[in-house]
Amino acid sequence: MSIRKKLFLISFLAFLVLGGTELFLISKIYTYNNTIKSIKDQSIETALLSQELKLDVVEVQQWLTEISATGGGQGYDQGFDKAREVSERFEERMETLQSIETDKENKQLLENSSSLFQRFYNYGRQMAQGYISGGQNTGNLYMAGFDDLRNDINGELDAYLEGRKSELRTEMSNIEESMEQLTILSLIILAGGLIVVGVVSNRISSGITKSLRVVGEGAQQIANGDLTQPMEVKRKDEIGMLANEFEQMRVQLSSLVTAIQRDANEIQDNSLNLSDLTAQTGESASQIAVTIDEVAHGVEDQSVQAGHILDAIQDTTQKVSFGNELADRTLKGAASSTTAAQGGQASIEEGIQGLQSTVRDFNEATETVQSLGERSNQIGDIIKFIHDISEQTNLLSLNAAIEAARAGQHGLGFSVVAEEVRKLAEETKKATGRISSLIKETQRETHRSIQLMESNQSRFTEQVRVIQDGGQSLRQIVEHVQSTEHDVGQLKEILKSIDDNTVNVQRMIESITAVIEETSASSEEVAASAQQQDAMVHQVRETIDSLSSIAQELNGQVAQFKR
């Protein structure tokens, strides 16, 4: 049952007790009021009637006594009529009084009074007749008896009035006694009702107070941080509902505090892990910065070496161009020699001179080709150095990618840059491989050209010797000159191929230089990103330290609760 219903029950019981008592008192008071009113009305009416009866007796006595004075003469004989009217009025009043009266003794007194009045009235008439017929003396004989009857009637009426007074006092005494009993009974009923209401109220209030005390103690324990004590209130009213709500609050608070402590521990553990990770990230960033610095130095070295290679290629291009010119001149000289040889013996001297000139030019071409071979060897060494640098750059980019992967989310930028550096290194490696292949092919062709030119040089020397010895070997000289012309044509083609390869190498070196410049710019961006990441790692570390302090403080607050 709810507290509202219990309080309503207590109020209803109190209202029932008080209302019942009040209704009972009102009913009794109404009854007593009616009784008192009836007694009052009867007492007043009987008293008035009794007094009026006594007055009627006096008036009858006066009218009949008056005849003794007047003698009942003409005009003075109305006393009999007046006495009769009063007598009739007396009888009517007596009947009224008898109808009101309920007490037998009082009724008997009234009957005696009525009988005495009839005797009194008749005796008074006889007395009046005596005064009329016998004179004063005769009438006086009746006077004493007439007064005695009057006194007897008054005595009976007085006795009746006294009885009525006594009866009235008795009834009033009974009413007062009943009122006292009613008052006592009302007090008893009121006290009993109040006791019942008090017992019920005390029992209900005790239950409510006990339950509220349990709830209050539980709330105090919760306020003190003790969440281990359950609230056991076996009630189905509002207090029980309140206790259940407090119990649910305690359970939820316990779960919440446990969850907060678990989360705080996780935050603290994660803060420690994040602190370690940020330390590692800082170290990785430092290593990346060092690596990028090394890459930058390597890129600078590559740029310098690429500049040297480009200078060497340009010099080689010039040498090849000069070799082409020499080959052209040699080819022209060979053609002239052939023409001169075919022109006849007369032109041998001129051919010898041309051949000597050709030998000189051929020697210069041979030296040029040998120099070109040395340049090709130097270019091969430089390309090998660039290839080694690209492999080192690739290795450094791989290390940078590994460090960026260890840095996690913060190393994504480094990972992208390291990947771009690795791609550039791979492209450089491929380009140097192609250049190396071209250089090797150029070296092979240059070596072949040197062999051919050394062979032609010996031939030219032999031809000169033969021509100097005589003109008998003119046919052989012509053949050799034709062979030389053919070889010089091949040499020209080789020099043209070398020139084309040199142009390609120059373009590749320019591409490598552009890649190196991009790598240098990327290295600068990576270095700036590394510095920015280092600053971010420092801020993250400060945030983690603050978060760890908050988690420790939260753990301290949560530790105050018992679960």
Image (tube, rainbow, N blue to C red):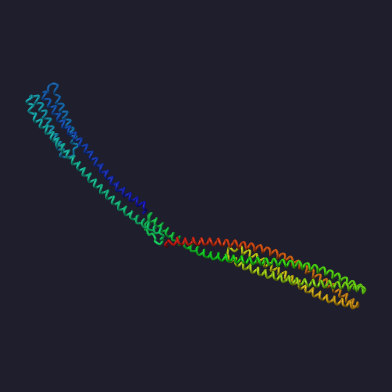
From the viewer's perspective, tell me whether residue 318 is left or right of residue 153: right
Of 531 and 451, nearer the camera is 531
Residue 521 lies, in percent from the top left, at: 66, 62
> Going by the picture, which residue comes out furthest to the top?
74
Does residue 490 appear anywhere in the picture?
no
Q: Quadrant of residue 277?
A: bottom right
Q: Looking at the image, is 440 positioned above or below residue 204?
A: below
> Going by the picture, which residue comes out furthest to the right?
346
- Residue at position x 17%, y 38% in the image: 165
Of 297 and 562, nearer the camera is 297
- Residue at position x 13%, y 32% in the image: 117
Residue 505 lies, in percent from the top left, at: 74, 67
Does residue 363 appear anywhere in the picture?
yes
Of 37 and 133, nearer the camera is 37
Which corner quadrant holds the N terminus?
Answer: bottom left
Q: How many labels, in total?
A: 0
- Residue at position x 44%, y 62% in the image: 559
Which corner quadrant holds the C terminus?
Answer: bottom left
Residue 446 lies, in percent from the top left, at: 78, 72
From the viewer's perspective, tell me whether residue 69 is left or right of residue 407: left
Residue 24 lies, in percent from the top left, at: 27, 45
